Amino acid sequence: MYDVSLTRGIKRDTKTVVASTLYQSYQWLADAIQINTVPLPNVSTPHADIPGSALFPREISRFFLRNRGHTLLVNGAPGTGKTLFTISGLDLLEQHGDVLYVSTRVDQETVHDMYLADHSSLDETDILDISQDAFERPLDVDVPLQRLDLDSLLEWLTQVSEANTELTVAFDSWDLVYQYLAARHDDPPDIETVTTQLVALAREKGIRTLLVSESVASPALEYIVDGVVTLQVSEDERGRTRRQLKLEKLRGVRIGNRLQPITLAEGQFRAIRPVKLSTVHSGTGDGTWTPRPNTKRKFSTGVGDLDPIISDGYNRGSVVHLDLGADLSRDAWSVLTLPTIRNFLANKMGVAVVPPREGSPGLLHNDLNAVLNPHRFETHCHVFGTYAGTVTEANPTTEITDEIEVESTTGDPNSETDANNSMTNKAYGQRADGEALDYRSYIGAIEQLREQSTGPVLHVISMDTARRTFDDRLGELANYIAIHNDLAVIITKPGTELRERADRVADMHFRLERSGSAIVLYGENPLTPLLGIGINRSQPIPEVTLTEMV
């Protein structure tokens, strides 16, 4: 947790001096410039377990923490989230020193209530505004400066930095501050000159500085400062908001992905971090999956954040189309399907899986045995076939085809030992000698699985593997699913021939795609906002989380 002690950081009398100085010196600017107060979004309390560092891009954290004298220019059109970005950065840097937020648009109390209350360690003494009469506040110290111009601004920054350590100052916006400074000179310097001297002072005194600009781009200023970021917002054809942070320049920091998805959900700036899929399905063995309840009409998705978005889960007897975008990792399909598989098995229901051709061979076995009783996987889960380009322990010389295979069984079917061994081979996805599986054989295997489990069956079918098996049979499969109150998740990839056909028979259509280095999910039917995929690792079993991107 953050240290919010009033005795830490800038001394209260020093902050009073700073506030008094800016109130007196900036009064002319408040009167001379018509300041439009931008309507702010409603703020609700965010998740309490998310530390400030989890909200901010790592590259920018490194940019500031590796060099105390860096200056960052924050570009963006109105409404793109520049102020929330700046507040989030100050909240993080406040852990390493003293911070000041200089606002030119709304008063001190409004800034605190709208941006800081309930989810920030900053208090009103960290905020300096120019929208109030400076003399309405009681002054218990002498004002050190009579007039604020370029020279006195630099003197003020020097005094504050010498009185405190690791100071960070944010000007929101720098454009308005410059307009005031220029108006105080008969022969005003241009903004490049003012910025150059401010950046030089910041480097000399080790002052971290954020300059917020209403201009979308200012090439001259971008050349002067040490770092440049631009906040962008757009809408897709269905009205979904898409926000991105573009990392233009960060001196001394390697930029892996220049475009990063962000959200302003719950009144906070939050970066959507990349997901390491290995942590999604590598159980520790220390936890047991607690089944999420199903209802008479719905199956839980197994993802706590997704169920309420789609009215408590998937409809019984329905088909879900999971549409995978380009450039996803080979096991991206498991992000949405694996929690549902876990939940079906935990509720003692059957699961049949036709994995993608390039998926990890041991993914299901390793994950499910780590979070469930291994017997549940062996008796209630059937993994059909194998993976393209791989061989299996059961028959390493078998030719790889586009069809899924059914394992032949040997021995006495009434023998409990032989039956368990046969089901174990099926559960591990090993390939025994057998014929290519046709649609009827698939249904026969499902009926056998249904007898060994309780209630409906979950079908997870990747069409790149099952193209021949389900060619022209998706409609028939959808009818079978509806009659038996089962659930089917049909997975398609770019270029899959049955992609449009799967969408026609599906009751729900979700798309999983890359956004920068992150992964986002959204629903086409039902329509949902963009949802950033994350992983909560605070529990023994990593949990998929979704963050609405607004």
Image (spheres, rainbow, N blue to C red):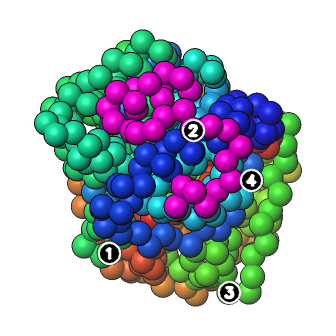
- Name the residue carrying label 3: 297
Q: Which residues are magenta?
A: 133-160
Q: Earlier in the sequence, mark 4 or mark 3?
A: 4
- In the rendered view, tell whether residue 463 sits above or below residue 373: below
Q: Which of pointers 3 and 2 indicates the residue nearer the eye?
A: 2
Q: Secondary structure at mark 2?
A: loop
Between residue 110 and residue 135, name the one nearer to us: 135
**Hey, what amino acid is under mark 2?**
Val
Q: Quadrant of the C terminus?
A: bottom left
Tell whether 539 sits left or right of 533. Answer: right
- How far apart, in angstroms, are the residues tagged by discs 1 and 4? 30 Å
Could one spot residue 272 in this view of the protein?
A: no
Q: Secondary structure at mark 3?
A: loop
- Name the residue carrying label 4: 48
- How far apart, in angstroms, are the residues tagged by discs 4 and 3? 33 Å
Give me the residue at 13% from left, 36% from top. 187
- Name the residue carrying label 1: 239
Tell me the tag on residue 143. Answer: 2
**Hey, what amino acid is under mark 4?**
Ala
Neighbour tally class for label 4: few under 14, some 14-19, many 20 plus, Cα within 10 Å: few
**Hey, what amino acid is under mark 1?**
Gly
- How far apart, in angstroms, are the residues tagged by discs 4 and 2? 40 Å
